[in-house]
Amino acid sequence: MSMQQAASVSAPEAEFSIKKIIAPLLAVIIGMIMVILDSTVVNVAIPNLQSYFNTSLNAIQWTITGYTLALAAVIPLAGWMTDRFGSKRIFLITIALFTLGSVLCALAQTADQLVLFRVIQGIGGGMVSPIGMAMIFKLAPPEKRGSVMGMLGIPMLLAPAAGPILSGWLIGLATWHWIFLINLPIGIAALIVGSKYLPKGDRQKTPSLDVLGMILAPIAFSMLAYGVSESRNGWTERSTLTGLIVGGVALIFFIFVELNRKQPLLELRVFGSSDFVRGVVLTWMSQVALMGSILMVPLYLQNILHYTPLKSGLTTLPMAICSAVFMPIGGRLFDKIGARPLAFVGLGIISGALFILSQIDTETTRTMIMFPLGMMGAGMGLSMMALNTHVLNSAPRKLVSRVTPLTTASQQVIMSFAIAGMTGYLSSRMTHHITAGVDPVAGSTAAFGDTFFLTASIACVGVLVSLILRKPKVKDEAPAPGAKGQPASDVDASMMIGH
């Protein structure tokens, strides 16, 4: 009987195919696309929003800042919430809240209302990616995770690149309201598909809520993001220093509290794995490189070349197409050759693309901008999900349940610093070139080139770091509390479902 049972267990694993999980995968992808898309669609609409509400640029920029702060603040709660109430229930609730926030944004009558409703969007959207990734991670067997996570990674690259295109098209065709109203049918579709096909996440026995961690984490992440966003007014300004100091102190206390709790809100002890740290550092560098193109290229096209929002968005289309093509390829290759070759090649392509962009001048053609953007998409497609999957696999088994909220929260903070840092560097280089007597247009173009060169240099460091990436050493560890007698091979799946 034991042999028959073993055969019955191994047969489904041998027969696994993507088709078997396509429905829940689709539900998660729809939700992630909707949330990630809203991180970039508003950027193109800022001038329209400023004119419509007759308000200052600093005031309307809080529609972006408030959304980012809300995202960063709620991510650490994802693990506890899904353990307590079940992953499927929380995933659907967050999708519903995000959809509601989107409709409210479209109905906003004042700039203050729009900022408030964007915060509601962010509160709903912050948990979607970590919970969705964890649910799909559970459904895929270890030997197929690269392929499955590769498919899941498509919205992570496609949505930010497609956001400016969609936004420019909707604003040109109708009004800014539709960049939010379009989320209503998408959200309803995600709720219907998710309700029917997502697996029911078993509730787990949860410890008492880490109240101190729950208070400190949102303060730390949101205040750091606030301080970085305010740095556009200067790093020595009171608002910037207040955000960075308060956030930094809260972060130090948060780290101390979490390291001394048996059941912390975020399991920071996972950084004790050198393989995990190497993978996370590389994902951070990839995020910085990604921001170098997604943020800077539209600014250059609209502010220097005076492209319309739609033309600017269409110019970035090669990035979206190439990322969608190479993401599944990267996932399949990960299953065969691991993360190091993909990270090396992917970041190498990204470095080359950014170096090409650093050579732009007033005579650079549109084609010579689209070509390196396509390279960026290909490089990201090959490396990003391979690195994300490597990070999940390199976490100690007993700590893997907390990895997705931890890495997602850290990436939000890194992206905030990247955006603020590159924007500040761009402004300083513009001032340098113009005060040196260079023509304003040529000086501004040179400043963009300098910024691309800086980003390319960071990507080059990532190429070197990828050389020390190694296949994680998986050790048999004791099952998590509440999973007594559970086979070591099943620990990943059971623990990832709630996070």
Image (tube, rainbow, N blue to C red):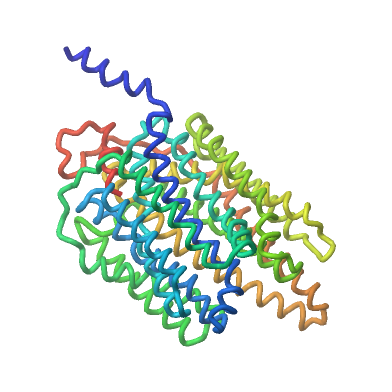
Q: Nearer the viewer, residue 324 or 143?
A: 324
- Can you give x and y, in whole percent of width and height, for residue 218 in the image? 33, 69
Q: Residue 234: in sight, yes or no?
A: no
Q: State the count of labels.
A: 0
Q: Is residue 127 left or right of residue 332?
A: left
Q: Residue 424: in sight, yes or no?
A: yes
Outermost right residue: 363
Outermost bottom residue: 238
Q: Residue at x 59, y 54 (%)?
A: 161
Displayed quadrant of residue 471:
top left
Q: Residue at x 25, y 33 (%)?
A: 488
- Can you give x and y, in whole percent of width and height, for residue 262 in the image? 19, 56
Q: Is residue 193 left or right of residue 56?
A: left
Can you say whether 164 is above or below 117 in the image? above
* Quadrant occupied by the N terminus: top left
Q: Is residue 458 left or right of residue 475?
A: right
Q: Nearer the viewer, residue 317 or 96?
A: 96
- Can you give x and y, in whole percent of width and height, for residue 289 in the image? 59, 56
Q: Nearer the viewer, residue 170 or 59?
A: 170
Displayed quadrant of residue 47:
bottom right
Can you say whether 229 is above or below 55 in the image? above
Q: Residue at x 56, y 39 (%)?
A: 342
- Can you give x and y, in whole percent of width and height, for residue 10 in the image? 30, 20
Q: Residue at x 26, y 50 (%)?
A: 89
Displayed quadrant of residue 134:
top left
